[in-house]
């Protein structure tokens, strides 16, 4: 019984200690929560707004004290002309220029007996025109024979065609020249005799025959020229007529003897061998992109023998969205240029080009329009069908001004700014503006609002005016409180 008394005393002492510690902790917590503000803390309190002077005659103008920059930390910024927008990025590709594509055809039916010769160099650049006498011995499987991808120049021989039509037309020209010479000599004799010796009818018939011969000669020559026969080839026909005329002058009854055939062929015989042959020449400088014939093929006027393209200029075809097309249409003629970014080898920097036209058709599936232009390709390194990106620099809109985004005061669906009055650093007035485009740092507003924006209360804001960027919310609140007070009513 005596031992239980000390145990109780120890227990009571422990309980008392716990009560004392708990009370101290609770009191400290309550003191920290509800302690009074001391002098040091009151010194760091945010100061009240400085005194703002109001003028009843101008209730929308705030007159700030001279120390407002230090107390309210009000800062201003100048409204600047709108900067140029981001360049348009149009995706497209390189295409052949249809106006620089030549389809080489034959103007008469015939048989292709020889092909032109290309350069032996690695890139198969320009090759010199080969005479027909050499082309006649050229095989179609020769590695130097022209093929797709070869570069040719204007006037280079592409192929040799043997045509009965050409031979007959040359013979018609020889016959017309011969008859003209004969009829001309007869008419000259009629002109030299005295009047009355020759009947008027015979004189007129002789003159008419000469005129018909002249027409026949010109008709045959013009037909051969329309078939793109060269002047030298037509002159060779006249030489043949001259040769025949000289032979007749010597002895019109002379006939070739069979023994003459054993002699070496003369120059006239060599020309007779190639009488019906004609060279097909390249009409332009370019690259053969299509070759549809080979030696032995019979061709007609509808056959495209070759297709040659001048690749010194390529056509750029890019897609533009509808809103981008509107921006492109506002460009001046001297601003219709773009920079072409190429993805192929050697495209380390953009290439300057020109915008040619905007096709007035919208693709109904993609809602894009087609913009075409040109790209210089003097080196010939660009590839047909290569993807490109066209960058178009747009000029700034002169009807817009740029202000910092912090200067804008949003009030529901309307926006306003505080603008300096007559350039004063202490007087400001609120002004509703027409916001056109919002950005993270800059807001574009219309310098002169349109009729609809004016009906909503928007006013003008020109470049050079000062707008408040820091402290504008507090000043706008002060102005609203003043207008709501009895003094402001």
Image (cartoon, rainbow, N blue to C red):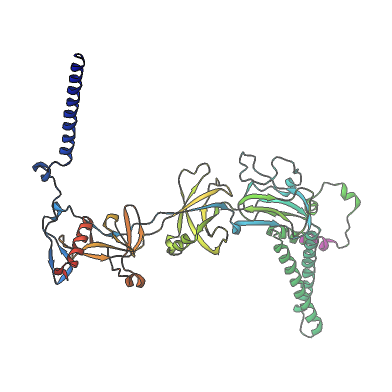
The image position of residue 330, as x and y in percent, is 43, 64
The N terminus is located in which quarter? top left
Q: Is residue 266 depicted above or below 170 in this figure? A: above
Q: Could you say which quadrant of the image residue 327 lies in? A: bottom left
The image position of residue 336, as x and y in percent, is 45, 60
Q: Could you say which quadrant of the image residue 437 lies in? A: bottom left
Q: Is residue 205 depicted above or below 231 in this figure? A: below
Residue depicted at 19% across the width and 19% down the height: 10
Examine the rendering and report whether any part of residue 275 can be seen.
no
The image position of residue 402, as x and y in percent, is 30, 59
Start-end of magenta stretch = 242-251
Instruction: Tell me if residue 243 is in the magenta stretch.
Output: yes
The image position of residue 65, as x and y in percent, is 11, 59
In the rendered structure, the answer to whether residue 178 lies left or right of residue 36 reads right
- As drawn, the residue found furthest toward the left would be 39
Of residues 194 and 383, the one drawn nearer to the viewer in this rendering = 383
Q: Is residue 259 depicted above or below 415 in this figure? A: above
In the rendered structure, the answer to whether residue 110 lies left or right of residue 484 reads right
Number of marks present in the image shown:
0
Instruction: Tell me if residue 6 is in the magenta stretch.
Output: no
Residue depicted at 20% across the width and 25% down the height: 15
Residue depicted at 33% across the width and 72% down the height: 455
The C terminus is located in which quarter? bottom left
- As drawn, the residue found furthest toward the front would be 1
Of residues 441 and 243, the one drawn nearer to the viewer in this rendering = 441
Of residues 38 and 429, the one drawn nearer to the viewer in this rendering = 38
Examine the rendering and report whether any part of residue 289 can be seen.
yes
Q: Main structural element of the magenta stretch: helix, strand or loop?
A: helix
In the rendered structure, the answer to whether residue 236 lies left or right of residue 410 reads right
Q: Is residue 212 depicted above or below 240 in this figure? A: below
Q: Could you say which quadrant of the image residue 171 lies in? A: bottom right
């Amino acid at each position: 019984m005596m031992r239980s008394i000390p145990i109780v005393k120890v227990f009571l002492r422990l309980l008392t200690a716990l009560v004392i510690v708990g009370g101290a902790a609770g009191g400290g917590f309550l003191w920290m929560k509800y302690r009074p503000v001391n002098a040091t803390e009151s010194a760091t309190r945010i100061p009240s707004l400085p005194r703002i002077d109001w003028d009843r005659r101008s209730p929308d103008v705030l007159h700030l004290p001279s120390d407002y920059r230090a107390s309210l930390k009000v800062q201003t910024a100048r409204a600047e002309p709108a900067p140029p927008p981001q360049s348009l990025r149009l995706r497209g590709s390189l295409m052949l220029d249809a106006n620089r594509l030549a389809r080489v055809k034959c103007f008469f039916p015939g048989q292709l007996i020889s092909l032109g010769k290309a350069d032996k160099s690695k890139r198969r650049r320009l090759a010199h025109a080969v005479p027909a006498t050499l082309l006649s011995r050229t095989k179609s499987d020769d590695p130097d024979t022209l093929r797709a991808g070869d570069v040719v120049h204007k006037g280079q021989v592409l192929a040799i065609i043997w045509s009965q039509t050409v031979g007959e037309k040359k013979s018609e020209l020889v016959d017309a020249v011969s008859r003209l010479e004969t009829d001309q000599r007869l008419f000259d004799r009629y002109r030299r005799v005295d009047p009355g010796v020759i009947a008027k009818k015979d004189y007129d018939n002789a003159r008419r025959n000469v005129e018909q011969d002249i027409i026949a000669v010109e008709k045959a020559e013009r037909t051969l020229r329309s078939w793109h026969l060269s002047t030298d080839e037509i002159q060779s026909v006249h030489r043949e007529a001259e040769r025949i005329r000289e032979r007749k002058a010597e002895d019109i009854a002379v006939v070739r003897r069979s023994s003459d055939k054993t002699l070496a062929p003369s120059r006239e015989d060599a020309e007779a061998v190639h009488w019906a042959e004609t060279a097909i020449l390249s009409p332009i400088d370019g690259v053969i992109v299509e070759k549809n014939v080979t030696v032995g093929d019979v061709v007609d006027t509808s056959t495209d023998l070759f297709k040659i393209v001048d690749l010194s200029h390529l056509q750029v075809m890019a897609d533009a969205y509808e809103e981008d097309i509107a921006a492109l249409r506002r460009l001046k003629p001297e601003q219709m240029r773009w920079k072409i970014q190429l993805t192929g080898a050697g495209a380390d920097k953009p290439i300057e080009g020109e915008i040619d036209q905007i096709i007035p058709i919208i693709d109904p599936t993609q809602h894009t329009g087609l913009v075409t232009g040109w790209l210089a390709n003097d080196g010939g390194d660009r590839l047909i069908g290569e993807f490109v990106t066209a960058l178009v620099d747009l000029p700034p809109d002169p009807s817009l001004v740029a202000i910092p985004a912090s200067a804008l005061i949003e009030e529901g669906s309307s926006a306003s700014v505080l603008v300096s009055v007559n350039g004063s650093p202490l007087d400001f007035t609120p002004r509703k503006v027409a916001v056109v485009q919002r950005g993270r740092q800059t807001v574009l507003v219309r310098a002169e609002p349109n009729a609809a924006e004016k009906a909503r209360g928007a006013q003008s804001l020109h470049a050079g005016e000062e707008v408040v960027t820091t402290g504008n919310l507090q000043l706008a609140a002060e102005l609203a409180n003043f207008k709501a007070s009895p003094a402001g009513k």
